[in-house]
Image (cartoon, helix red, strand yellow):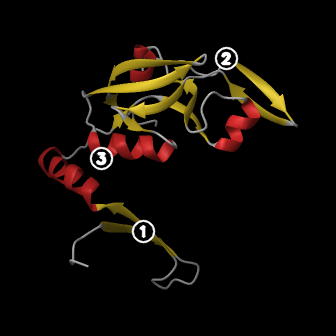
Amino acid sequence: MQGEVIGINTAIQSETGEFSGVGFSIPSNTMKRIVPVLIQTGHYEHPWLGITGITVDPDLASILQLPVSSGFMVNTVVPNSSAAKAGLHGYKETKTINGTKYQVGGDIIVAVDGYPIQKIEDLLNYLQDQKSVGDNMALTIIRDGKTMQITLTLQERPNQF
């Protein structure tokens, strides 16, 4: 231990009213990026792609017969978002397998700027910790079984998201 700040607590969920329970914190590296901007301008522009989707894991990949066993499969693309302008594709159809409905056929993001994406948290953390509004970001995607590169320019996340 070196006595460094690793996070800033923002809330504690407690059933008893005591200061015990589940704590929620923001990583200090994130705060180092956000706080100076907040102090200077009173507003922080969060970078945003404009997609929803699901983490691809080995189980999902097996069920849906996907070409990769990790990544983030895009379900929807918000109109006029960075993702839409770059041409990312959401799901094409819904399949029911063993009584469960799945949205399938969307692009699968497997890397961002060369960094592997195993799950949605990898994408969100990279976006928050490494990128700003106006930055370009290179996505490696799988579309219809083929690997492709797409570059997009990040926009500010709208208030409704």
Label 1: state its secondary structure: strand
The mark closer to the camera, 2 or 1, is 2
Query: Which residue corresponds to the image point at 27% horizontal and 37% vertical from the top-left?
Result: 131
Foreground residue, 76 or 159?
Answer: 76
Label 3: state its secondary structure: helix
Q: Quadrant of residue 100?
A: top right
Which dot marks residue 11?
1
Vertical comparison of 19 with 36: above or below: below
Q: Is residue 136 left or right of residue 89?
A: left
Which residue position holds label 3? Answer: 129
Vertical comparison of 62 with 26: above or below: above
Earlier residue among tags 2 and 3: 2
Q: In which quarter of the image is residue 158?
A: top left
Amino acid type, mark 2: Lys
Amino acid type, mark 3: Asp
Earlier residue among tags 2 and 1: 1
Q: Where is residue 93 in the image (x, y as percent from the top left)?
A: 72, 19
Q: In this view, does 36 lie to the left or right of 160?
A: left
Amino acid type, mark 1: Ala
The mark closer to the camera, 3 or 1, is 3
Foreground residue, 10 or 53?
Answer: 53
Which residue position holds label 2? Answer: 92
Which dot marks residue 148?
none
Spatial CA distance of label 2 from label 1 is 40 Å
Label 2: state its secondary structure: loop
Query: Which residue corresponds to the image point at 68% horizontal and 35% vertical from the top-left?
Result: 61
Q: How crowded is mark 3: few (under 14 residues within 10 Å), some or many (20 or more)?
A: some
Q: Quadrant of the N terminus?
A: bottom left
Q: Where is residue 94 in the image (x, y as percent from the top left)?
A: 75, 24
Q: Residues within 10 Å of mark 1 (few under 14, many from 20)?
A: few
Query: Which residue corresponds to the image point at 55% horizontal and 23% vertical from the top-left?
Result: 107
